[in-house]
Amino acid sequence: MNVTSISANLNAVQQRIADSSAAAGRAPQEITLVAVSKTKPVSAIEAAWQAGQRHFGENYLQEALEKVQQLHGKGIHWHFIGPLQSNKTRLAAENFDWVHTIERIKVARRLNDQRPSALSPLNICLQVNIDGEASKSGISPQQLPELAAAVAPLGNLRLRGLMAIPAPDNDPQQQRQTFARLAQLLDNLRRQLPDQHHLDTLSMGMSGDMDAAIAAGSTMVRIGTDVFGKREPGKQHHND
Ligand SMILES: *Cc1c(COP(=O)(O)O)cnc(C)c1O
């Protein structure tokens, strides 16, 4: 994928964000595009950066670290969106601006302890298993209030909101209803924790369901394929 096509893809995705938010009566600036660059080379990120993209999402820590180091000083906001094991938290705490996938208090406490004091608090989202799938990451909606209450006081973290990866579904109506449930959970959380002033984030929507997510209130869409093209199967680093 060359520089021109990545730039054209970014324009097309931004146009879709504009169209979907207009249809929902929302301002496009309410939605941050996180370009998901997992398995893609540094050159692809540089091409997107030249086109003005500043938020990037990565799933595999080892792979991400090389990119973070090589692109240091470019003002990139790095989002960790993959499963995070508790023995890898230090790398995330030191190198990322956001972690979207918090599902255990133990991981949150380690990130809080390991966040360097020279950096601003680490932005985090709690990942919800919104469809109750046995194989999926994330906590259940029932466990969410307890986890949120435990995470909220951690001073080196900033609890920003919720993230979910719904079960695949091609029906936009269904997609939207699922995302609306996550939006409702964030509303509940705001009532539960009125002194948390940064609960402003719904990290939901990927290439296949971005428009439904925006209709349901997404503030952060995580787009890989529609920005960088298809990923090669087998190119993922599952040992992370
Ligand atoms: C890979 C990935 C994405 C991007 O998916 P696309 O369908 O390629 O847009 C978004 N979020 C998470 C958590 C991912 O792992």
Image (cartoon, rainbow, N blue to C red):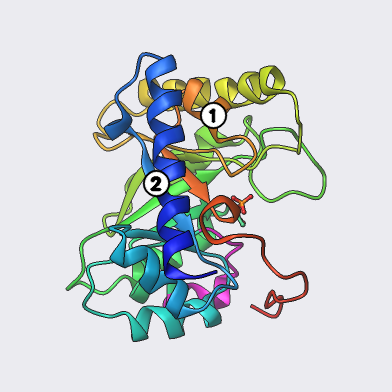
Residue 216 seen in render = no
How packed mark 1 is, by other alpha carbons closer than 10 Å (few <14, some 14-19, many 20 or more), is many
- Amino acid type, mark 2: Asn
Task: Give left or right: position of 114 versus 143.
Answer: left
Q: Residue at x 37, y 78 (%)?
A: 68
Percent of width and height locating residue 30: 31, 32
Above/below status of 76 relative to 141: below
Q: Is residue 7 magenta?
A: no
Q: Is residue 90 magenta?
A: yes
Residue 77: image quadrant is bottom left
How packed mark 2 is, by other alpha carbons closer than 10 Å (few <14, some 14-19, many 20 or more), is some
Percent of width and height locating residue 72: 27, 80
Which residue is most to the right? 134
Quarter placement of the C terminus:
bottom right
Identify the element where label 1 is drawn.
helix
Pick the front one: 2 or 17: 2
Residue 211's label in the rendered image is: 1
Q: Which residue is mark 2?
A: 11
Q: Which residues are magenta?
A: 81-91
